[in-house]
Amino acid sequence: MPIVVDIDVMLARRKMSVGELADRVGITPANLAVLKNGRAKAVRFTTLAALCAVLDCQPGDLLRWDAEGTPGG
């Protein structure tokens, strides 16, 4: 998958646990784990906005494109 999710990086910078982030964002820890581990097929903008608000970051701090992950890349 060419989209890499860097939630772990922001969690470490903010010294926050996955459980605390899930509670503050309003999603289940299981759904956050799916997103965090790059297994999600989509993310709602409302969820992305909530993640950014809680982590005090921009969407680009959480998601990045990796050309190495693309077919033929």
Image (cartoon, helix red, strand yellow):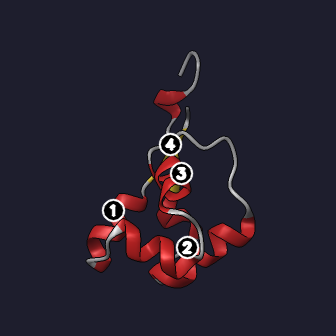
In this image, 7 relative to 17: left or right? Answer: right
Identify the residue at horizontal 50%, vertical 42% (top origin).
38
Residue 32 placed where, x, y %?
A: 51, 58
The earlier-in-sequence mark between 2 and 1 is: 1
Say few, some or many: other residues with alpha carbon within 10 Å of mark 1 (under 14 / 14 to 19 / 20 or more).
few
Say few, some or many: other residues with alpha carbon within 10 Å of mark 2 (under 14 / 14 to 19 / 20 or more).
many
Residue type beneath disc 1: Val
Identify the residue at horizontal 50%, vertical 29% (top origin).
69
Residue linked to disc 1: 9
Residue 37 placed where, x, y %?
A: 44, 45
| As drawn, 56 above or below 72 | below
Could you say whether the residue bearing mark 4 is in a helix, strand or loop? loop
The earlier-in-sequence mark between 2 and 3 is: 3
In this image, 42 relative to 3: left or right? Answer: right
Residue 51's label in the rendered image is 2
Could you say whether the residue bearing mark 2 is in a helix, strand or loop? helix
Disc 2 to disc 1, C-alpha distance = 13 Å
Could you say whether the residue bearing mark 1 is in a helix, strand or loop? helix
Residue 38's label in the rendered image is 4
Residue linked to disc 3: 35
